[in-house]
Amino acid sequence: MMRVARVRIDDRLIHGQVVVKWLRYLDCRQILIVDDELWRDDFMQSVLRLAAPSEVRVQVAPVRQAAKLLRSSTLEAMSRHPSGEASSNGHGVLVLLRSPQTALALLDNGFLFSELNVGALAAGKGTTRLYKSVSANSEQIAALRAMQDRGVRIYFQMVPEERPVEMSELLPAR
């Protein structure tokens, strides 16, 4: 079975930092993007697949289906390269999400993870800057806190070379 190497929130999904830094650092040959809206958008899925290196398989799934895949051995079925050749067992899966709410929904649907890497959340109306490229609105902060209350270690880290910063250092307990 494939191992989940990291669960990461990055609203840009597949981009230079993910492709050049994280995939190599985590030894991943597969990306699972969990996003209900993107799952219904074939064009954007194609764009994201083109952004990934050819040896990396990109799968997009809605929350419920992704939680089921991640809880079961069906990740093995996803471990095949687009050419049809099976990936080696040592490689992992990078789970990418656009929002904290999606991460919380994965937990609510039975995919239990102990750590959550927050890499980027764009600033916008009603958001507060938490760390470098991470800004969040009240709903996003509430989702992060809910996961933290359930024992998930949440940390901010844009690239592997950077020191992870714990959410508890930036957002005091309620």
Image (spheres, rainbow, N blue to C red):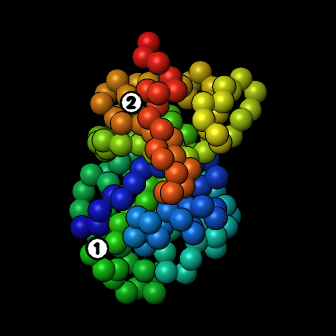
Q: Residue at x 64, y 57 (%)?
A: 41
Q: Is residue 151 left or right of residue 66?
A: left
Q: Residue furthest top?
A: 174
Give the class, few, some or many, for how many residues have Cα within 10 Å of label 2's Cα (few <14, many ≥20): many
Q: Secondary structure at mark 2?
A: helix
Identify the residue position indicated by label 1 in the image: 90
Give the class, few, some or many, for how many residues have Cα within 10 Å of label 1's Cα (few <14, many ≥20): few
One can see residue 40 in this view: no
Quadrant occupied by the N terminus: bottom left
One can see residue 8 in this view: yes
Q: Residue at x 55, y 81 (%)?
A: 54
Q: Residue furthest right?
A: 125
Q: Position of residue 27 (x, y in %)?
A: 40, 70
Q: Residue at x 43, y 26 (%)?
A: 168
- Residue 138 location, quadrant: top right
Rendered image: mark on residue 106 = none
Identify the residue position indicated by label 2 in the image: 147
Quadrant occupied by the C terminus: top left
The residue type indicated by label 1 comes to: Gly
Q: Is residue 42 above or below residue 152?
A: below
Q: Residue at x 64, y 40 (%)?
A: 132
Q: Is residue 165 above or below residue 96?
A: above
Q: Position of residue 163 (x, y in %)?
A: 48, 47
29 or 101, nearer to the observer: 29
The residue type indicated by label 2 comes to: Met
Q: How many marks?
A: 2
